[in-house]
Image (cartoon, rainbow, N blue to C red):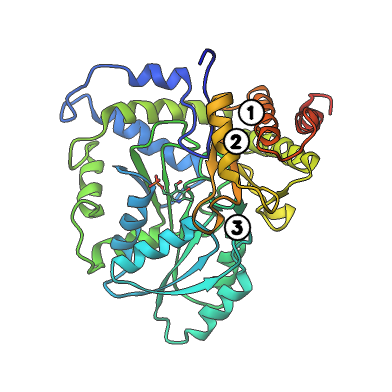
Amino acid sequence: MAGRHFLQIPGPTPVPDRLLRVMHRAMEDHRSSAFPALTRSILSRLPQVVQQTKGEPFVFPATGTAMWEAALVNTVNPGGRLLAVRFGQFSHLFIQTARALGYQVDVIEEPWGDVADPARIEAALAADTAHEIQGVLLVHNETATGVTSDVAAVRAAIDRAKHPALLLVDGVSSIASLEFQFDAWGVDCAITGTQKGFMLPAGLGILYLSEKALARVDSCTMPRAYFDLRAMRANNAQGYFPSTPALSLLFGLDEALTMLLEEGMDAVAARHRLLANGVRAAVNAWGLRQCAKRPEIASNSLTAVMVPEGHDARRVIEIAFTRYDMSLGSGLNELAGKVFRIGHLGDTNRLTLAGALAGVEMALCDAGIPVTLGSGVGAALQQWRVSA
Ligand code: PLP
């Protein structure tokens, strides 16, 4: 098809030309005396993305899923007890990863479309008077349902319960697009990948640890090999990595950091908020519901849209793909066929999204879901006009 493909899934996101160009270069010797400059440029600036001033960031050739494992095996002893909230496919998979590693996970179930309830976390921790629970697993932005949990409120709940558990936060679809305050929210461990807010291909996993979490790395008795942060820390301190780094992606990450920090993380978050407001206005104008149960928990990085009863969201997605050259995110697990997801994170802007919303309108109509053509686009443009 002529023209460009609209990649409107919530990751991987479109890669800006500036990042494609910087990654398109010859390989270098990762043991050379020149190499540490790149390592240091990345590791010294990664903390700014999440407003971290204490602790350390780590980068692995890996993805977000791998960073769940890296976070756990470096901070939680074998068989350790954890507390997690399940409210979507990614919180479900985080729990599954922990269980596969032999941890015991107490699960607080919330309906999909809702978020973590700090009061329930507080109650569960308060009941653990022996302080067996070593960590609380929280997905900040549940990409399956398009909702954002309040990390600061969860930290406050842990503190109210006077519980020493670490707070381990999945920020895969929030970090580098939504506000993330690592220090101020009392996060001990945050994980992400490069294919969302960082606007790069998948392939690097990023892990941030607080000083409290770092203190556990050496004493943790969990067997680890590839994800052993002791080796990573020792190498990083010299400007190197323990194994061959994914060089192209590191060049890309270095430039992505420049782009994000040039824009400023507050401006990045504000841009995502503005774009999300327009998409939500479009969904309302179509008369459709979001998967997010309340407006205040709706995510600014993606919107999960419910199709009316009797319709199959997979058909909308297939029509958008085959007729209009646009990829939309599918419904995962229990949401399969019930929702389609519009990604609006990373390298995107109002006019790109206006085109995407136009494509959604046509696909909806073609799938027999009656919406007035132009209604959603018009509602979004009202939000997005500079004078609006
Ligand atoms: N956590 C969240 C919130 C995600 O959205 C994803 C992927 O979309 C993952 C974890 C898994 O990350 P990856 O696919 O990079 O392994």
Nearer to us of marks 1 and 3 is 1
Q: Secondary structure at mark 1?
A: helix
Q: Where does label 1 land, which residue?
A: 356
Identify which amino acid the numbered label 3 is placed on.
Ser
In the visual, does 102 lie left or right of 371?
left
Whether the residues at callouts 1 and 2 have beta carbons within 8 Å, the answer is: yes
Q: Quadrant of the C terminus?
A: top right
Q: Please give the name of the residue rendered at 47% of the width and 31% of the height, measured from the top-left corner.
A: 199
Q: Quadrant of residue 357?
A: top right
Whether the residues at callouts 2 and 3 have beta carbons within 8 Å, the answer is: no
The earlier-in-sequence mark between 1 and 2 is 2
Judge by depth and name the residue closer to the eye, 158 or 293: 293
Label 1 and label 2: CA atoms lie apart by 10 Å
**Percent from the top left, x then y, of residue 178?**
58, 43
Judge by depth and name the residue closer to the eye, 183 or 248: 248
Q: How many marks?
A: 3
Q: Which mark is residue 149?
A: 3
Residue furthest toward the right?
Answer: 388
Identify which amino acid the numbered label 2 is placed on.
His
Residue furthest toward the top?
Answer: 2
Label 1 and label 3: CA atoms lie apart by 26 Å
Nearer to us of marks 2 and 3 is 2
Q: Secondary structure at mark 3?
A: loop
Q: Where does label 2 land, which residue?
A: 344
Nearer to us of marks 1 and 2 is 1
In the visual, does 17 lie left or right of 331?
left
Whether the residues at callouts 1 and 3 have beta carbons within 8 Å, the answer is: no
In the visual, does 333 lie left or right of 212?
right
**Percent from the top left, x then y, of residue 163?**
49, 76
Q: Please give the name of the residue rendered at 71% of the width and 34% of the height, measured from the top-left corner.
A: 365
